[in-house]
Every structure is written in structure tokens, then in C-alpha cells.
Image: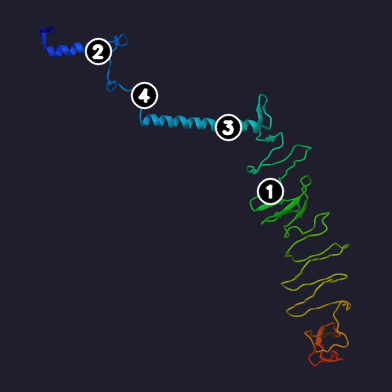
Amino acid sequence: LFCFQQSSNGPVKKSMREKAVERRNVNKEHNSNFKAGYIPIDEDRLHKTGLRGRKGNLAICVIILLFILAVINLIITLVIWAVIRIGPNGCDSMEFHESGLLRFKQVSDMGVIHPLYKSTVGGRRNENLVITGNNQPIVFQQGTTKLSVEKNKTSITSDIGMQFFDPRTQNILFSTDYETHEFHLPSGVKSLNVQKASTERITSNATSDLNIKVDGRAIVRGNEGVFIMGKTIEFHMGGNMELKAENSIILNGTVMVSTTRLPSSSSGDQFGSGDWVRYKLCMCADGTLFKVQVTGQNMGCQISDNPCGNTH
């Protein structure tokens, strides 16, 4: 049997094998009602749409990154809302004014405050400004000048000097500008504790005494000499007193030396025994003091090389 297919050039003759293959394909397509009218199409030949491969992985990474940023933004928003307390009536913790003033309406916990140039930190009128450090010192610093308030002490450090003045009257209470202002202790301050002081003159009031006390060793040194003047000058020491001078030591006025606390030897000791070297304190008629080593009993100050000359 031969089957002819009508075409523009006339009927096309098919062989028996081609007709069998066509019949088998038709039976396979219409073998089930579920496949009736269904024509399978090869997926590789379809037009692909969407993000595939590396583009798809990149899109997933971008989506994850946006999600993380959204979570961080939410956390920051919640923290700001909890700290600043923004509500329907505005901010409950602080106020912003057109003049640039920032007013805190509640107790604020801050670590470091950096005011702007020529800024002022203060409290309200008729109210105290309370600054508290939690077991840490409170430090006010501007350049090299620093004020540290601690539990047991308050220290001020400055390389250019300092001044304390009354803000109402502008009167200087205390200043380290010694070329312009003479150094005076502020009213109510009875003592000044320093480790080292360099000055030209130290005086006291006319009605009070000048007391210099140290726990250890005190050294008074002058580049051109040391002059001590007063109605009564007293030295109380627990150890030795040493006077050194390049030229001479002059003691004007009545000089009293209490020998009650000076070490003395018993009558039975030998003058050359032991590690002690004994001296006798002698004085000239003009007030010059000198020492003479004691080498025997009943020894006086008449030695050949004494500084008194002919008058003893």
C-alpha cells in the first residue's frame, strides 16, 4: 500500500517504514487521556528566563546583606528610643534650643564630653551642677591644663600657670603669675604642701609665725646665699643639722644652743677609744664658731690654727 500526502508540488509518497513509525508515534501520544492534546517539548530548546547560576547566588547574598542591615538599623533605633525616650510629646531626656543650647532633663551617664570651641557647661539657675564619677576621678582638661578631682585629693596641673578669681567681682583670689601678682595663700588656707618650691622670698604675716615642717630631710639652697631674718628663729630637728657655705656662715644676734640633747661621753670613757670622734665647740669674740678635736682631758680652745686670731 502506498499513501500519498498532498503538497504544493503534489502528493508525497511514503514508504511502509515511515508510515509505521508515524502510526507508532500517534498511538503513543494518544494512549492515555491525560496526555490527550499534550505535546512534549524539549526543555533545552526553551527560552530561559530569571536569574540562574552566579547571578542567582549574587542576588541571594545581596538579599541577606540587606536583611542584616535592616536588623542592625532596628537595634539602633530601639537603643536610641530607649535612651533618648522619644515619645508622642517629644524627647523626654533632652531639649534642643535654637540658640544651640542642649539641655539634659534627667540624670545622664556619659564617659567623655568634648565641648565645642568656647562652649560652656553649666547648671540651671539656683540649682547645683552635680558631676559624679563611679569610683573614678573626674578630670577637666583643656590642652596641657588638667584639673583632677579624686576621692582624697584635688590636683591641678598646668604648664602655663593658673588663676582663681571671683566670677562676680572678677577679683583674683590666687594666681601663679608671680611677675604681676605676689603669691599669697587664699583666705582659709593654713598650710601649703609642696615637694619642691623655687622662689625669691618666703614671708609670713606680721601677726603669725612662719613654720616649715618636713617628715624627712629639708634642703634650703640659695644661688647667691640664704638669708633668714625674724624676731626669733628656732630649729627643731630629730637628726643632724648641716650648714654649708662657700665663703662664711654669719649668725647675727643672740645664738643659743641647747646642749641637753647633744651626745656626751661619760667620765670613764677614753678619748681615743671606739668609733667616736669628739669635738669641742668654741666661739670667738666676734661670734665666729669653730670646732676643736678633743684629744685629752682639760683641753681648751687655745690652738695655733684657730680662726679668732689673737682674741679668743
* Residue 192 occupies quadrant: bottom right
Q: Position of residue 129 (x, y in %)?
A: 75, 41
Pointer 2 local density, CA inside 10 Å: few below 14, some 14–19, many at least 20: few
* Residue 120 occupies quadrant: top right
Pointer 4 local density, CA inside 10 Å: few below 14, some 14–19, many at least 20: few
Mark 3 or 4 closer to N-term? 4
* Amino acid on which the number 1 mark rests in the picture: Phe
Q: Looking at this view, is 254 or 279 the one in front? A: 279
Q: Looking at this view, is 46 or 12 the one in front? A: 12
* Amino acid on which the number 3 mark rests in the picture: Ile
Pointer 3 local density, CA inside 10 Å: few below 14, some 14–19, many at least 20: few
- How far apart are the alpha carbons under marks 3 and 4? 34 Å
Pointer 1 local density, CA inside 10 Å: few below 14, some 14–19, many at least 20: few
- How far apart are the alpha carbons under marks 2 and 1? 95 Å
Residue indicated by mark 1 = 140
Q: What residue is rendered at 80% in x and 73% in y?
A: 239
Residue indicated by mark 4 = 50
Q: Position of residue 64 (x, y in %)?
A: 47, 31
Mark 2 or 4 closer to N-term? 2
Mark 1 lies on a secondary structure that is strand
Which numbered mark, 2 or 1, is in the foreground of this view? 2
Residue indicated by mark 2 = 28
Mark 3 or 1 closer to N-term? 3
Q: Are the residues flagged by discs 2 and 3 in contact, CB closer than 8 Å?
A: no
* Amino acid on which the number 2 mark rests in the picture: Lys
Q: What residue is rendered at 72% in x and 35% in y?
A: 106
Q: Are the residues flagged by discs 3 and 4 in contact, CB closer than 8 Å?
A: no
